[in-house]
């Protein structure tokens, strides 16, 4: 049995410090450059009716952070291609094929600063009985959008009990019983990590008025890529890298 932490006679500030100290799941040092907080970041809506409510829910969930405000805006790309747009996230869904992945999050970064990002969710799997559930759709959309502003995973074991965060891998996202709490939304550790990532401001901004769109789309990640893990880095030259998180199907379909 794990230890129970009892806080007696502490202030709200000290509780926040404890929570922040326990947060350790940033995606490297990647973040959007901005001159003030909160970070106001547009998310292009390139998703269809089956996904629109889940995109809206993820945007609302993450905007509860004190350092982040996501804004849904009209999409800027065709969903099948899902090309990035400078200074914002593009969210897309399509039948991307039997690739082995449920979702992809991809960022283009110069140094540690994100300049553009995409989220893709794969209807080839979400149109099947195994994944066509509100819980799976919430989990994957919530997680992939969060990668696009710098959050990593809290845990990467599909078989471990749920942590109550969409940044946690799971075999059963709606939880219950031995699986633990639902993994469909952010938890306090996620918000504490965001405060660490965006606890400073920058002298420049890569949001909205950023540089011209950077080259390159996602390579065709497929089952053959699975053996190499879920993180891929492509050097695009001139200090720019394209970094991809792949959310593989947990059951190896």
Image (cartoon, rainbow, N blue to C red):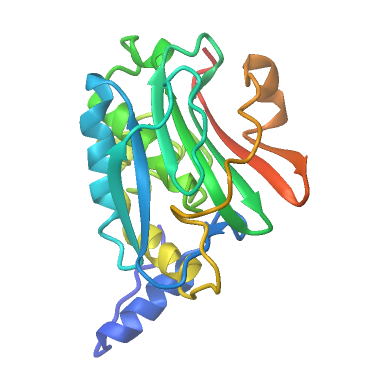
Measuring 44% from the left and 46% from the top, which residue is drawn there?
88
**Residue at screen point 28% across, 56% down:** 63
Instruction: Inspect this view and state whether residue 182 appears.
Output: no
Q: Nearer the viewer, residue 65 or 8?
A: 65
Which quadrant is home to the N terminus? Answer: bottom left
Left or right: where does residue 151 sit relative to residue 93? right
How far across and how far down the image is residue 248, in percent?
A: 53, 26
Q: Choose between 191 and 73: the one closer to the eye.
A: 73
Which residue lies at the image location 63% right of the left edge and 21% below the top edge? 221
Q: How many badges with numbers are in the image?
A: 0
- The location of residue 50, given as percent across then percent down, is 24, 20
Q: Quadrant of residue 219?
A: top right
Image position, residue 111 (x, y; %): 69, 58
Percent position (x, y) of residue 87? Answer: 48, 49
13 relative to 42, above or below: below
* Residue located at (36% from left, 16% from top): 126
Out of 85 and 111, give the one closest to the viewer: 85
> In the figure, is residue 56 to the left or right of 89?
left
Can see residue 148? yes
* Res. 135 image quadrant: top left
State whether residue 99 is above or below residue 207: above
Towards the viewer: 178 or 239: 239
Is 31 placed above or below 106 here?
below
Locate residue 37 relative to residue 117 in the image: left or right: left
């Amino acid at each position: 049995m794990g230890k129970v932490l009892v806080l007696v006679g502490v202030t709200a500030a000290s509780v926040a410090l404890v929570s922040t100290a326990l947060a350790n799941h940033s995606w490297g040092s990647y973040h959007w450059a901005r001159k003030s907080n909160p970070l106001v970041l547009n998310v292009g809506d390139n998703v269809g009716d089956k996904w629109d409510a889940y995109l809206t829910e993820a945007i609302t969930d993450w905007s509860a952070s004190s350092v982040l405000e996501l804004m849904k805006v009209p999409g800027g790309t065709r969903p099948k291609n899902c090309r990035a747009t400078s200074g914002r996230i593009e969210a897309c869904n399509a039948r991307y094929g039997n690739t082995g992945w449920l979702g992809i999050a991809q960022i283009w970064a110069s140094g540690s600063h994100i300049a553009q990002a995409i989220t893709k969710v794969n209807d080839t799997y979400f149109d099947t009985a195994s994944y066509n559930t509100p819980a799976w759709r919430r989990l994957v959309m919530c997680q992939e959008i969060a990668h696009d502003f710098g959050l990593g995973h809290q845990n990467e074991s599909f078989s471990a009990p749920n942590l109550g965060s969409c940044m946690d891998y799971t075999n059963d996202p709606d939880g219950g019983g031995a699986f633990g709490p639902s993994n469909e939304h952010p938890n306090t550790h996620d918000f504490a990590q965001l405060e660490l990532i965006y606890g400073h401001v920058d002298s420049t901004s890569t949001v909205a008025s950023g540089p011209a769109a950077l080259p390159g789309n996602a390579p065709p990640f497929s089952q053959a890529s699975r053996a190499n893990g879920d993180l891929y880095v492509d050097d695009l030259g001139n200090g720019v890298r394209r970094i991809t998180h792949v959310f593989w199907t947990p059951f190896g379909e």
